[in-house]
Image: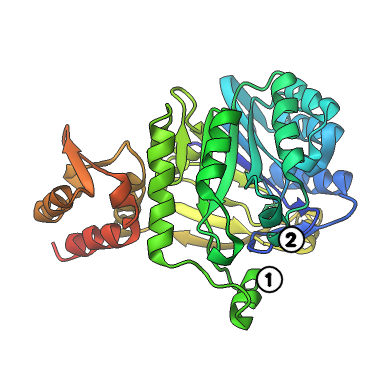
């Protein structure tokens, strides 16, 4: 299976957000040239001699926008040495509000970025501060307007929900604010307490209390109801899109397609094997500078592993799961009767209520399959 999708991890952040356990490198000054030299070295080791032909390219992080206007232009030039964008290719870049200026927005669009994922998280100033985000509410709306004025016509907004009750965050107000901003796409992230994060230390000390399942479910369903009644398609458990604006890159992951990747911690998949890079920036840089692949681990997916993945991935999107993958139809009929799924055209699709139980429903199907 040849890869038609390329992910590039840009690890730099201004500061670690309280909840984040991603592979990042906190740098007041981003070593743009050093990073690009390392990335070029890795791509030279991984790319086919006749280049990848890609339908989607995704710059994630970290905070790719910290590379600045010239940095992203140079990054696109490096990638172009190893990958040819197919006509109409989607090129997404994750952007934090504090990095958006009229100059940077124009440079990114001129360089070929045609989809922006803007890390807003909330429009509540005190909650942004609690999260250790470095931007203000005003910077979020200004960044959005600046991207639009520069010609961006495909913007996704990220929001976090299920925050501790003591923050008094008004979730409904944030969703309604998103509707007035009017992006093409919205991604939701339910707050989780990850090991080693400041949030985990606050929870251990008792200064932050995670919300219970009821609040999580209520906020998830509220977002589903408000966004879907305002023209958004809830097409994946955490993602909503206006017609024609689904994330093509992320959809490739959910469809089980092969994808290539480079940068610290980046994961790739060739159809049967998944492997991933060293996480720390310095160790990744050392490996690629020495001319060695920075691969940290790999997992060969057995036939059963892949069947399990197809179940999980199929259930998380509205494309659904073919009934031919289901060995025990009584299980999915029970879900349908409970309002957790619909069945049509030989395909089962979870409802929003079903997505609240995604992990346990997928586990039920996997178990019934292994007992088959
Ligand atoms: S900006 Fe994103 S990647 Fe960086 S620390 Fe915050 S959540 Fe993590």
Q: For the residue labelled by badge 2, is the local secondary structure a helix, a strand or a loop? A: loop
Write down the residue under mark 1: 198
How far apart, in angstroms, are the residues tagged by discs 2 and 1? 9 Å
Q: Residue 349 location in percent, x, y?
A: 26, 42
Residue 212: name its quadrant: bottom left
Q: Residue 55 location in percent, x, y?
A: 54, 27
The front one of 320 and 150 is: 150
Q: Quadrant of the N terminus?
A: top left
Q: Is mark 1 within 8 Å of ligand 1?
A: no
The residue located at (76%, 20%) in the rendering is 110
Q: Residue 154 location in percent, x, y?
A: 59, 25
- Vertical order, 250 against 121 (above or below): above
Residue 218: name its quadrant: bottom left
Q: Is residue 104 left or right of residue 314?
A: right
Q: Is residue 297 left or right of residue 289?
A: left
The front one of 57 and 259 is: 57
The front one of 49 and 294 is: 294
Write down the residue under mark 2: 16
Q: Say whether residue 320 is visible.
A: yes
Residues marked 2 and 1 touching at CB (< 8 Å): yes
Q: Residue furthest bottom?
A: 205
- Vertical order, 5 against 161 (above or below): above
Q: Is residue 332 left or right of residue 40?
A: left
Q: For the residue labelled by badge 1, is the local secondary structure a helix, a strand or a loop? A: helix
Q: Which is nearer the N-term, disc 2 or disc 1?
A: 2
Q: Is mark 2 within 8 Å of ligand 1?
A: yes
- Vertical order, 110 against 137 (above or below): above
The front one of 169 and 21 is: 169
């Amino acid at each position: 299976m040849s890869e038609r999708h390329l992910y590039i991890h840009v690890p730099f952040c201004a500061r670690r957000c309280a909840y984040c356990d991603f592979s990042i490198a906190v740098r007041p000054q981003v070593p743009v040239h050093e990073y690009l030299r390392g990335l070029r070295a890795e791509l030279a080791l991984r790319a086919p001699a006749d280049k990848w032909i890609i339908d989607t390219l995704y710059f994630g992080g970290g905070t790719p926008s910290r590379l600045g206007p010239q940095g992203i232009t140079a990054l696109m030039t490096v990638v172009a040495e190893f990958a040819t964008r197919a006509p109409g290719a989607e090129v997404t870049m994750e952007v934090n509000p504090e990095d958006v200026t009229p100059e940077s927005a124009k440079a990114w669009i001129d360089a070929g970025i045609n989809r922006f994922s803007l890390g807003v998280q909330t429009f509540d100033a005190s909650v942004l501060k609690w999260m250790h985000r470095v931007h203000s509410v005003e910077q979020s709306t200004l960044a959005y307007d600046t991207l639009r004025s520069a010609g961006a016509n495909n913007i996704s907004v990220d929001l976090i929900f299920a925050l501790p009750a003591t923050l008094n965050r008004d979730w409904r107000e944030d969703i309604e604010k998103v509707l007035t901003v009017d992006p093409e796409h919205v991604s939701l992230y339910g707050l989780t307490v990850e090991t080693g994060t400041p949030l985990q230390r606050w929870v251990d000390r008792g200064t932050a209390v995670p919300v219970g399942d009821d609040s999580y479910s209520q906020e998830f369903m509220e977002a589903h109801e408000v966004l879907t009644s305002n023209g958004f398609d809830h097409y994946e458990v955490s993602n909503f899109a206006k017609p024609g604006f689904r994330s093509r890159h992320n959809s490739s992951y959910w469809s089980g397609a092969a994808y290539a990747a480079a940068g610290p911690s980046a994961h790739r998949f060739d159809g049967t094997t998944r492997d991933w890079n060293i996480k720390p920036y310095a160790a990744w840089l050392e490996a690629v500078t020495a001319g060695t692949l920075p691969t940290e681990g790999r997992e060969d997916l057995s036939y059963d592993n892949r069947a399990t993945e197809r179940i999980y991935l199929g259930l998380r999107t509205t494309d659904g799961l073919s009934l031919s993958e289901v060995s025990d139809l009584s299980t999915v009929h029970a879900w349908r009767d409970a309002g957790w799924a619909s069945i049509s055209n030989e395909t089962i699709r979870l409802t929003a209520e079903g997505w609240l139980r995604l992990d346990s429903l997928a586990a039920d199907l996997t178990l019934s399959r292994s007992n088959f």
